[in-house]
Image: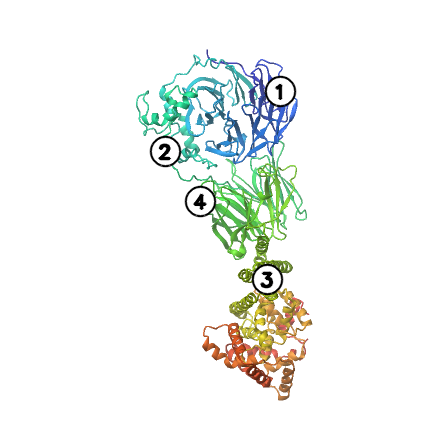
Amino acid sequence: MPATQKPMRYGHTEGHTDVCFDDSGSCIVTCGSDGDVRIWEDLDDDDPKSINVGEKAYSCALKNGKLVTAVSNNTIQVHTFPEGVPDGILTRFTTNANHVVFNKDGAKVAAGSSDFLVKVVDVMDCSQQKTFRGHDAPILSLSFDPKDTFLASASCDGSVRVWQISDQTCAVSWPLLQKCNDVINAKSICRLAWQPKSGKLLAVPVEKSVKLYRRESWSNQFDLSDNFISQTINIVTWSPCGQYLAAGSVNGLIIIWNVETKDCLERVKHEKGYAICGLAWHPTCSRIAYTDAEGNLGLLENVCNPNGEISSSKVSSRVEKGYNDLFDGDDTSNAGDFLNDNAVETPSFSKGIIHDDEDDDIMLASGRPRQRSHFLEDDENSVDLTMLKTGSSRLKEEEEDDQADSIHNLPLVTPQRKFYDGPLPTPRQKPFQSGSTPVHLTHRFMVWNSIGIIRCYNDEQDNAIDVEFHDTSIHHATHLSNTLNYTVADLSHEAILLACESTDELASKLHCLHFSSWDSSKEWIVDMPQNEDVEAICLGQGWAAASTSALLLRLFTIGGVQKEVFSLPGPVVSMAGHGEQLFIVYHRGIGFDGDQCLGVQLLELGKKKKQILHGDPLPLTRKSYLVWVGFSAEGTPCFVDSEGIVRMLNRGLGNLWTPVCNTREHCKGKSDHYWVVGIHENPQQLRCIPCKGSRFPPTLPRPAVAILSFKLPYCQIGTEKGQMEEQYWRSVLFHNHLDYLAKNNYEYEESTKNQAIKQQQELLMKMLALSCKLEREFRCVELADLMTQNAVNLAIKYASRSRRLILAQRLSELAVEKAAELAATQVEEEEEEEDFRKKLNAGYSNTATEWSQPRLRNQVEEEAEDTGEVDDIEEKSEIHKQGQNPFSKSANSCNVPAINSVTSSNQGRVNPFKVSASSKEPAISVNSARSTNILDNMNKSYKKSTALNRATNNEKSPVIKPLVPKPKSKQASAASYFQKKTSETDKTEEIKEENPKNSSSETSAVCAQDTENQRPKTGFQMWLEENRSNILSDNPDLSDEADIIKKGILLFRVLSTEERKAWAIKAKGETASDVAETKKRKFVDESQETENQKEKATENLNLPKKQKPLDLSTNQKLSAFAFKQE
């Protein structure tokens, strides 16, 4: 008897409708988009009981007197059946759930949601939940394995997965479906189903056929299809006995197969051709209830006899059809299918393969394989011998399940062609905007950054964009219409940038609202060329950038002027801008085994455009993808991957990436995540939004921002040593941005830098003390190598007081070596300064200045080597860089005594360690020459340097300590030499140096002043002058002055006490005038190349200014006016 189709009747308002039977089959239960669940005693029931469960009901399931529904308020609700009394909420999602199913005994419920999550909840104890993650798009459908071992799921990401319920892992993933961004856009809702009782087969509707996969081996056993199927199959369901399979298509066709024979038993067409979206087989009778997408309910009766005999309306088919179905879709020319064959064998491959849609349509529409020339064609009853042999091992299992009546059911295990066994490619990550939530959501964040928030609302009531600023002084909140369906947005303190995709009628557009513009026109729109879509955008200071599907990056000014256009090496993933910096992440190749293969470019778009990172690989955690790209508030590039690892660019380590935080360590549950919205380096803060059970937050209620701390992944972080190491290197990393700001002439707080250096040195001293206690002296020297000069001196004292004399000696040697290295570095810097000075002189004057006298600068450093007694010489060498901090570029030092030493060396400029017999006049003359051209050398550090001199002039230090100019403050130090001298002695000395032919009385007066103010030379210096040639001949490798002095110290100590006293007496016997004459001669010899400049300097210095401090030269008057000197 053929199946009987009863007339359909109205059940719910138009929209998705679901249907099921109760346990006994006495009632039909439906739910629809009107939010009602209706209980029908029969199709003819004119007054069905109605239960309102919410605004919309997407799915329902019934078991053991429990009615479970997936409702539009993002919950899974329970009602008693048939009373309809609410019985609580099983679980919640961040968006609406799409499908809900019971397991076989009704103890558990599985639900899949549009937030990509699958949850399995215990009905009696809803706290017992398991969450399954791995899908990258909304869940379409679910099906429980009858044995409660596996759970199957289908998703809009195109994949069908089988999960191991016990450990929540993915057993296998097949890339079978076409990808889409939401359920409403899916071609099929793909309602898959396990075979009842044994659970041996899993039926998956794919395009125009049903694929059946075998349990455990996960091989594609065969496909069920029919030539009458012209549209995609939407849903499948099994008969309770497991022998028959019913399927419904999107054009209203219902087909029933005998799974054993693969014969088509019934074909029933919907009377109006609506899509079948609900299909349920009666638990005992041969009846099938079905619903369509318009809310109607229908019933098929007498589908097949209870004893399993096929009805008389069976469709005839040849035996060969079953054999053909074994190879349905087999085509070696399709690269996607070639990879799909191995997807079954590689459970670790979880992302799936992207299909070629056109090829798939051709292949599946035919219902026959397109290429079968490599199979042997015999008569219809013959079977391949290889098939029999390979299938014999499973024959016994087939017989136990009573499913081996046909020879065509033998599994085809041996492949007919070679399979690819290597690693499988990972689907490329789609472009995204940092700080945005998925595009398919009706209410979503388009961007959330440190400036503000842009929300998008796209529902039945409104399609609009709201812009909110954290600081309302930048701009007031704005409401924009979204008629062009903008999908990406960015926000800065200058503008709002929006972009939309192209449509059939309109091109892709880039829309900028330049609210900070001073004119009345504050908007501009640019249309992209045909077939070119904007995929990622970002804003910087004065510019905007858009990368497109044509692998182009287009730059615009903030006012809308098109600038440079250049090609990207691969499809863009995301972009970020900050100031002049542009950060681009793109696909640099194909990743394998779940890994993404991303590259990064970092550009500076200032006046001198340059590329910092040239397509370097972006390091991601294994099997993760990128979720956030941006800059810290201070301008350091950072990114976050899906495993919660935050990485920051380490500019102090050759632009490598350092992990600075693992947000997963702060999550309480496995399903919880942190959604990053901003990073700050000072103070060290990671600003993010906690998301419970989701990867992103809902727009309403407004989510709260949490602050996480940073922690570098150092070893043994629980120990005191590991903790201090992590704190030290974190401090160094998070203050690298200060060096970058200084290098690029940005303003920054000097106190911040000084505080960081102080903290770092304290940590190093603590680690050194800890190593001393552990008797790790070699480690102490390694730590001292990281210290500043002040800290090294403290370390030497600590070692001496700890009675570790060998360590103290090693640290002393280290201090001398560091001083020598600094001296060598300073020479190179002076040469660079000389080149720079020559360029300045070309545009201004040839006056002798600091940069044009590198030898004189070195001479000043040499003078700073000598400060007194022989026993103090090593200590003074160690203090050689005491005033300088290798981490600091500020004009201020951390050490007040060191600042005082600048005064002494600037005003006295006498050094008892001077190698050649000389006086201080040449040094003073250098200062005088420098002071003649202040406009050439002044920079923005002027205020700092004047403040420094004011402090140093007020205090006199009894000990002269050398201070090597700091890398950042070379010009600032030079500026300090230009200050007016308040001492009459200095002025007299300068006149004496520049006017050697003055009257004898004037000369004698100057010599008298020199005798009073100049410290006498030491015996060691006298001995070193006479023995210098011998030291150099014995040690030809000594080229540095510090090394010569060090060697001289050792030799001088060998002398007897009487000899040393004799040298000291000899030093006292030499007059200051002789010393002055000698030094003057040496100065003249070394300065022959700049004689013309010296003469000009002499003319300038002979002006009345030397007698009257307030009568300034023209240049100094101009500088005083420009820089508020007076």
**Depicted 899 relative to depicted 269: above or below:** below
Which element carries disc 1, helix, strand or loop?
loop
Residue at 61% across, 14% down: 46
Residue 681 shows in this picture: yes
Tell which of 419 and 568 is nearer to you.
Answer: 419
Q: Secondary structure at mark 2?
A: loop
- Mark 2 or mark 3: which comes first in sequence? 2
Q: Is label 3 in contact with label 4 (beta carbons under 8 Å)?
A: no
Residue identifier under label 3: 888
Q: Which of the 4 image quadrants contains residue 312? A: top left
Relative to 337, say whether 408 is above or below: above
* Mark 3 or 1, closer to the camera: 1
The amino acid type found where label 1 is placed reads: Phe
Where does the image place residue 960, in percent across and percent down from the top left? Answer: 62, 74
Who is closer to the viewer here, 1074 or 739? Answer: 1074
Q: Determine contact: label 3, label 1, CB under 8 Å.
A: no
* Camera-side residue of 1066 and 735: 1066
Q: Going by the image, does 477 lie left or right of 212?
A: right
Crowd rating for badge 3 (residues with CA inside 10 Å; few <14, some 14–19, many 20+): many
Q: CA distance from mark 3 to mark 1?
A: 75 Å
Residue wearing tag 4: 589
At label 3, the amino acid type is: Ser
**Disc 1 to disc 4, C-alpha distance:** 56 Å
Badge 2 vs badge 3, beta-carbon distance below 8 Å? no
Q: How many marks?
A: 4
**What residue does disc 2 label?**
332
Choose between 613 and 153: the one closer to the eye.
153
Characterize the local packing of mark 2: few (<14), some (14-19) or many (20 or more) Cα atoms within 10 angstroms: few
Residue 81's disc number: 1
Quarter-of-image position of residue 752: bottom right
Residue at 67 percent of width and 45 percent of height: 476
Percent coordinates x, y for residue 242 in the rendering: 47, 20
